[in-house]
Image (cartoon, rainbow, N blue to C red):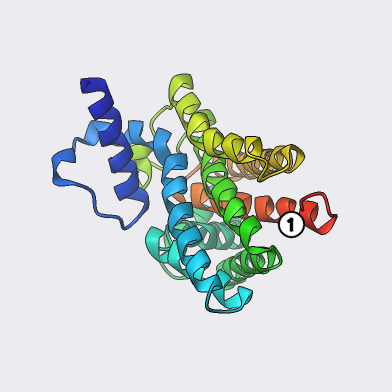
Amino acid sequence: MASIVHQCRLFFIALQFFTRVPIPGWVGFDPSWLHHASRYFPLVGVVVASVAAAVYAGAAALFPAPVAVILSTAAAIYLTGAFHEDGLADMCDGFGGGLSTERVLEIMKDSRIGTYGAVGMGLTVGLKCAALWSLPTPAVIVALFIAHPLSRLAAVSLIWEMEYARADGKAKPMAQHMSHREFGIACACAGVPALALATAGMLPWLALLASVAGAALVAWWLGAKCLRRIGGYTGDCLGAVQQMAEVLIYLALLAFFHRGAWP
């Protein structure tokens, strides 16, 4: 029983860290819990997907698809405090404008947004919206429940495989070494809803495999780039991986629908 309560605490800590959702007072706080809470980052994605899907379903009953998608996307961004979008913008600015490791890290720490960041974030959000409103309503809801957990699993894989690149930073408390068991829990949090949707016939198995491959490709490519440029990852890198993996998953699912492989 104590172990179950502790796991619930870790989930709520992750929910508080990655979203604006208030957590119950009984959860409490211990700094040592933070670096174990990242295992539930994909489960936080399920919460975000639930809110985004609810907003989309309600809006789609009243408005055209583009409006419903924008409202759903806005709800997800508000819920997370634009945490991941900010990371993507910072990484675009740092990697686009920095020549040395020190300069890249310095730019990424700057709260101001530059041209690279504005373009990167604008294109990413635009692609997300365009891909989603090209899908029918049931497929959009499925896509949200696939993309949000899986994209966060892609980000978690950097914590599992790499070292944190800064001496300090917002993500430093959660950037301690992740064990294989903890990463397995993260995989289960992302995998269970995806497998449930595919088993229920709401998503083709090949489309699910393409989504997983897309998320893995983003994690590998951006992870290698981070390792080469700054010797590890930062919180901004995690946000960038999450955002780019989410976009690639939507595009993979849209490709299956467009080819008629997803009725």
Residue at 62% across / 68% down in the picture?
129
Task: Tell me which corner region of the image, top left, top right, bottom left or bottom right, holds residue 51.
Answer: bottom left
- Across and down, in percent, residue 181 comes to 45, 20
**Which secondary structure, mark 1?**
helix
Residue at point 58% right, 49% down? 147
Q: Is residue 239 visible?
A: yes
Of 75 and 214, which appears nearest the observer? 75
Q: Is residue 123 above or below residue 103?
A: below
| Nearer to us in this view, 131 or 50 | 50
**Along the viewing direction, whichever of 29 and 203 lies nearer the viewer:** 203
Visible residue check, residue 232 = no
Instruction: Tell me the quadrant of the picture where the N terminus can be found.
Output: top left
Instruction: Determine whether, in the image, residue 109 is placed left or right of residue 246.
Output: left
The percent coordinates of residue 76 (x first, y second) are: 45, 62
* Residue 159 versus residue 263 in the image, above or below: above
Mark 1 burial class by Cα count in 10 Å: few <14, some 14-19, many 20+: many
35 shown above or below 102: above
Q: For the point 60% across and 51% down, which residue is it?
A: 142
| Rendered position, 84 above or below 130 | above
Amino acid type shown at disc 1: Leu
Q: Which residue is most to the right?
A: 259
- The residue that appears at 53% across and 49% down in the rendered structure is 148
Q: How many callouts does the rendering have?
A: 1
- Which residue position holds label 1? 254
Q: Position of residue 192 (x, y in %)?
A: 53, 33
64 or 17: nearer the viewer: 64
Q: Is residue 59 left or right of residue 30?
A: right
Residue 87 pos. (x, y %): 48, 57
